[in-house]
Image: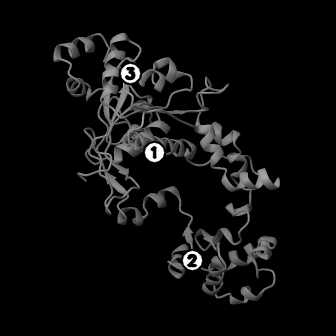
Amino acid sequence: MQDKPLAGIRVIAVEQYGAGPFGSMQLADMGAEVIKIENPATGGDIARKSGPYFLGDNDSDFFQTFNRSKKSLTLDLKSAQGRKIFERLVQSADIVMNNLRGDQPAKLGLDYDSLGAVKREIICGHLSAYGRDNDRATWPGYDYLMQAEMGFMDLTGEPGTPPARFGLSMVDFMSGVTLAMAVLGTLVGVLRGGAGRDVDVNLFDVAATQLTYPATWYLNRDHETTRVPRSGHPSTVPCQIYRSADGWVFVMAMTEKFWQILAEGLGRVDLLDDTRFRTVASRRENREVLTEILDAEFSKHPNTHWVSVFAGRLPLAPVNSFAQAMQNPWLAQTGMLQSLPHVDNSQFRLLASPLKFDGNRPTGTGCSALGADSEDLLLGLGYSAAEIAAWRSGQVI
């Protein structure tokens, strides 16, 4: 794609590991030039050293997962000369993003109070654990902690088992996407003539907002949502996993129409007239009895049979193992597997961007090696080769 929607937008990303890089990668996928600022003294983003699988001396599968299509500029932001270089770079940029602890952006001069004087239109996007304006601003934090404190773990798993986290760091990923959305919304205002500003997102707040309707029920009705057996929906039945001949199948009969299709497809139209299952409320009251009946029916055939029977008519999916999920032919058929040429692995593959523009997914490249773009970027800012060489020897870059 030569006409990606963010072509011409420059983003500076002071970031590491997962949440922040995942957010800025969405902008890179849409065509923004995303420049990672990496510390020359520490080897850059710690994700470069996150195993167990590596690509060369200072790169990894994990790192490339979150940094597709980005450039790397090594720069010591705490040095006087590094700061001068950074401010010149800011003058050429539209957005500065970071995912540092809440008290760090002001100390490093990454907030609008510091950078607004450098460029009025600059947007300063901040992603922290707990925010920058409260008593927890100095606290470090991670996805799993948010899942623990905000009740996610209490809602996950079978009743009577210990609290469990999600299998993936979804609070991190949702926070990254939320910041990307917020800075793009702000960019619209800037492009209409407005000034830049600080934009704040934090893991705790994003986790809280994902509580959605259970939170509304509690705040207004004192209703406490609890775990339901078989990963069931808290109010709609049948909506859970059922045993099949070769595993499990997830069924979501969320409407009366789907309930009727389910009964007919199973050859059990008698269930439609059974007073125990005639309404949503009665099915909820008799969830356990209905589970036994549906288990018996689904256990007669394997998952492939049921997918074939209900394809396109009833929301139903096999409960795959992780390996089965990755081997799902639907991924390849829909273009969700992407080859990403990499200097140390020409066959390197990633899951593709979920975005499509005019029916096409954006292509991408591997993130540059640590500092590989430093010289080109600095020459582009008007610095000389001699200056760049001197800074490199002094570990400014």
Image quarter (top left, top right, bottom left or bottom right) of the C terminus:
top left
Q: Position of residue 276 (x, y in %)?
A: 81, 80
- Tell me: residue 21, above or below residue 395: below
Label located before the other in sequence (1 or 3): 3
Residue type at tag 1: Gly
Image check: 299 left or right of 283? left
Image check: 218 left or right of 183? right
Question: How far apart, in angstroms, are the residues tagged by discs 2 and 3?
Answer: 52 Å
The quadrant holding residue 380 is top left
Question: How far apart, in angstroms, are the residues tagged by discs 1 and 2?
Answer: 37 Å
Q: Nearer the viewer, mark 1 or mark 3?
A: 1
**Which residue, given by chain and number where applicable, does mark 2 sit on?**
314
> What coloring was used for the rendering?
one colour
- Tell me: residue 122, above or below residue 320: above
Residue furthest front as drawn: 193
Q: Nearer the viewer, mark 1 or mark 2?
A: 1
Residue type at tag 3: Asn
Of helix, strand and loop, which one carries label 3?
A: loop
* Residue drawn at (42%, 34%) of the image: 195
Of helix, strand and loop, which one carries label 1?
A: helix
Q: Position of residue 244 (x, y in %)?
A: 61, 73
Of helix, strand and loop, which one carries label 2?
A: loop
Q: Nearer the viewer, residue 232 or 60?
A: 232
* Residue drawn at (44%, 57%) of the image: 326
Asked if labels 2 and 1 touch by Cβ distance under 8 angstroms, the answer is no
Q: Mark 3: few, some, or many residues within 10 Å (few <14, many ≥20)? A: many
Label located before the other in sequence (2 or 3): 3
**Which residue, given by chain and number where applicable, does mark 3 sit on?**
39
The quadrant holding residue 335 is bottom left
Q: Nearer the viewer, residue 299 or 110?
A: 110
Q: Is residue 237 visible?
A: yes
* Residue drawn at (61%, 48%) of the image: 166
